[in-house]
Amino acid sequence: MDILRAAEQLRDPLAAYASVDRSRPYGACWVMANMVGGLDGSAAIGGRVADLSTEPDAELFVSMRALADVVLVGAQTLRREGYGGLSLPEARVAARVAAGKPGEPVFAVVTRSLDVDWAARPFADPQGGRSIVITCETADPGRMERARRVADVIVAGRERVDPAVAMLRLSERGHRVVLCEGGPTWLGELVATGQLDELCLTVSPLMGGDPLPVSVSPPGSDLVRWSLRHVLADGDTLFLRYERRREGR
């Protein structure tokens, strides 16, 4: 584990994350999540995560997207946070292009109901290529047709989205790193089904937020153990990076 380091003393705080080997065998995608929580574990203030974030967290939150092929959110997160696009700083875009990647990651949303504002920028003006909608077979046919007009639709499961099938379909498209940005219910399902490889957790120096934890596990889920890989600090904001424990590690 890296020792505690002050982020402002590093040339680039993202470097500690960029140096990680996220390759997986057989072309499977590596699934990481970037979440923020208060000192009391709250994952939102007034229903929004953005109000919980500090300036250092907000800066790293955007930069973290440079590591991903896909930025994935749940429909509730899309509605509440008002995603306006995945614009990266010019230097990050240039680095991705130099590495042979698209300048921006692809945006994706998980939604069983397909109750989504299709005029929102991620669909009306996608920057990393055509956005992706992940849904299930029983979704409303009319909404499914509407979704196909503005996005690539992946069907992953019958009555609900199966996280394992969803990640398989993304890997089949050649996506190797998937970055989940919420929300807590979808994160809990990724963890419970063994899909989450890495959790990047920002601890914000605040208390008194909504009674909503960073992750909500499905009923009957087993405990999942994690290994702390590095710790960074910027002022009063703490950045933790964990990887799921595997046999022999």
Image (cartoon, rainbow, N blue to C red):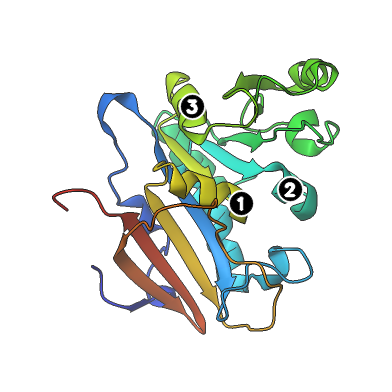
Q: Amino acid at mark 3?
A: Val
The tag on residue 152 is none
Residue shown at 40% from the left, 54% from the top: 222
Quadrant the N terminus occupies:
bottom left
Residue carrying label 2: 76
**Label 1 Cα neighbours within 10 Å, binned few <14 / some 14-19 / many ≥20:** some
Could you tell me if the residues under marks 2 and 1 are in contact, i.e. CB atoms within 8 Å? yes
Name the residue carrying label 3: 165
In contact (CB < 8 Å): disc 1 and disc 3: no
The amino acid type of the residue labelled 2 equals Gln
Name which quarter of the figure residue 62 lies in: bottom right
228, 93: nearer the viewer:
228
Q: Can you give x and y, in whole percent of width and height, for residue 108 in the image?
A: 62, 34
Regarding mark 3 in the picture, which secondary structure is present there? helix
- Residue 15 in the image, given as x and y percentages of width and height: 36, 58
Q: Which residue is mark 1?
A: 185
Residue at image x 28%, y 34%? Answer: 24
Tally the marks: 3
Of the two numbered discs 1 and 3 on the same chain, state the one appearing first in sequence: 3
Element carrying mark 1: helix
Kindly state the secondary structure of the residue where label 2 is placed.
Answer: helix
Q: Is residue 166 above or below residue 242?
A: above
Identify the mark nearer the N-term, 2 or 1.
2
- Residue type of the residue flagged with mark 1: Thr
